[in-house]
Amino acid sequence: MRVLLFFNELSCSKALPKEQVDEAMKQFVAVLRAVAARRGDTGLVSDVKLAELELAPGYYLSEWSGRPANVDLWRWIRRMQNRAPFSSVLPQGAGEGADYHWQGRTAKALGAAHLMDGVLVSLQVDPAWDAPWVHAERELLPEDPDELDLVKQNVEVRHVSSLDHVEEHADWIEQAGISDFKHGSDIWEARADLYPHLSFLPRTEQHFAGLRRDWVIPAARELLRINGAFAEWDPTLAKEPHWRSDVTPESKSRIRKRLFEFEDLDGVVRCFELHGRFAPGYGRIYFRLVHEERKGRVAHVGDHL
C-alpha cells in the first residue's frame, strides 16, 4: 500500500528559460513535501532515472541539481522513494493493448497513474497543468479479434501541480489503501506511513491484533482524523488541536479512578484521557497530547474503558 506520484513528462516538453523552470521546481518540491507529510509511503515514479529527467528541452535535472540555489531542493527529492521506469510499478500485463493520449500526444505517466489509481504530478509551467484532474483519452484493442476499430474511452486522472491541488485530494491521499484492510494488524504495520503525527505505546500492537473485523476500517479512519488534526496543530497558538471528529476528555470522576493511566514510552505513568470514537458499538481510541513533539500518543484501541 503506497501513494504513487507519476511524474508527467508532458509538463516538461515546453521550451522555457531556466529561471522559470527553477521557479516551477520550487513549487514542485513543495507539492512533493505536502503529499509526503500526509503519507510517509509516498513514492515518485518517473519514466527515466531522476538524474536523467529533462525538465525542459535541453535542461536536465542533473544540471538543475548542480546549481547552488537548488542543492537543498534536490537533497529533499532524493529522500523520496523513486522508481523508474513506469513499468517497474505496474503489475505484469497491466496496460497491454491500451494507449493513453492527452490532446493527441502519447501520455505515459498519465496512463500509468490511471492504471495504478495513483496521482499525476506536473511542473506548473502551463495553465493546462493548473487543474486537480486531467482528462485524457484511452484507446483499447477490441475484444473481438475480427473487429478493426480501436475502442476509445474518456478517462480522468488525479493531478497535482500546486498546494491547492494537494488539498483537493487530501482525503484520498490520507485514506488510499485503507479500504483494503482486513485485519487490525494491517493498521499496525502501516502506522508509520498512515499516521506520521501519532506514536503508539507497544501495548497497542496487541489491541490491533485482536481488533474486531467490523472495527478495522472505522478505527483506521478515526486514527486518520486524529492524525490530521495533529498535523495542523501549533501548540504555541492553541492548547489542543482542532479536532475533526468527536474527541473529548473523560470525566474527572472517571479520571480519578485511574482507568486511563498507562506506562509511557519513557517509563513514566501518564494519563491518556482524550478519546476518539468509532462504530459500531463503543469503539474508542485513548491518547494524550505530546506538546514537545506536536504529536499524539495512543495508549488504547478497542472497547470503551
Image (cartoon, rainbow, N blue to C red):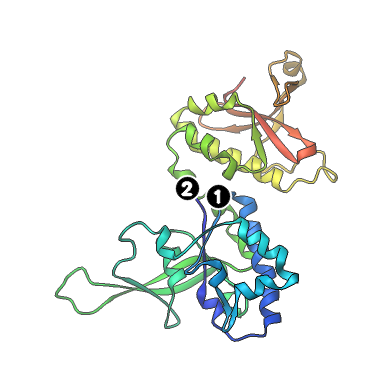
Q: Is residue 101 visible?
A: yes
**Helix, strand or loop at mark 2:** loop
Q: Position of residue 296 (x, y in %)?
A: 70, 36
Res. 41 mark: 1
The C terminus sits in image quarter:
top right
Tell which of 221 and 290 is nearer to you. 290
Q: Residue at x 51, y 67 (%)?
A: 49
- Tag 1: amino acid: Asp
Dividing the picture into quadrants, the one containing residue 298 is: top right
Report if the CB atoms under discs 1 and 2 are less than 8 Å apart: yes
> Is disc 2 surrounded by few (<14), some (14 to 19) or many (20+) residues within 10 Å?
few
User: Which residue is under mark 2?
Assistant: 1
Mark positioned earlier in the residue sequence (1 or 2): 2
Q: In the image, is residue 130 above or below residue 198?
A: below
Residue 266 percent across, percent down from the top left: 73, 25
Q: Is residue 5 left or right of residue 298?
A: left
Kindly identify the amino acid type of the residue bearing the numbered disc 2: Met
Taking the image as shown, residue 19 lies to the left or right of residue 51, namely: right
In this rendering, is residue 126 above or below 83?
below
Residue 151: name its quadrant.
bottom left
Where residue 150 appears, x then y in whole percent?
Answer: 26, 77
Separation of residues labelled 1 and 2 (CA atoms): 8 Å
Q: Which quadrant of the view contains residue 236? A: top right
User: Disc number at residue 204?
Assistant: none
Badge 1 density bin: few <14, some 14–19, many ≥20, Cα 10 Å: some
Residue 211, visible in the rendered structure: no
Q: Residue furthest left?
A: 146
Where disc 1 sits, the SS reads: loop
Residue 193: x and y in percent read 57, 45
What residue is at 58 percent from the left and 84 percent from the top? 58
Residue beneath the point at 60% across and 28% down: 284
Q: Residue furthest right?
A: 236
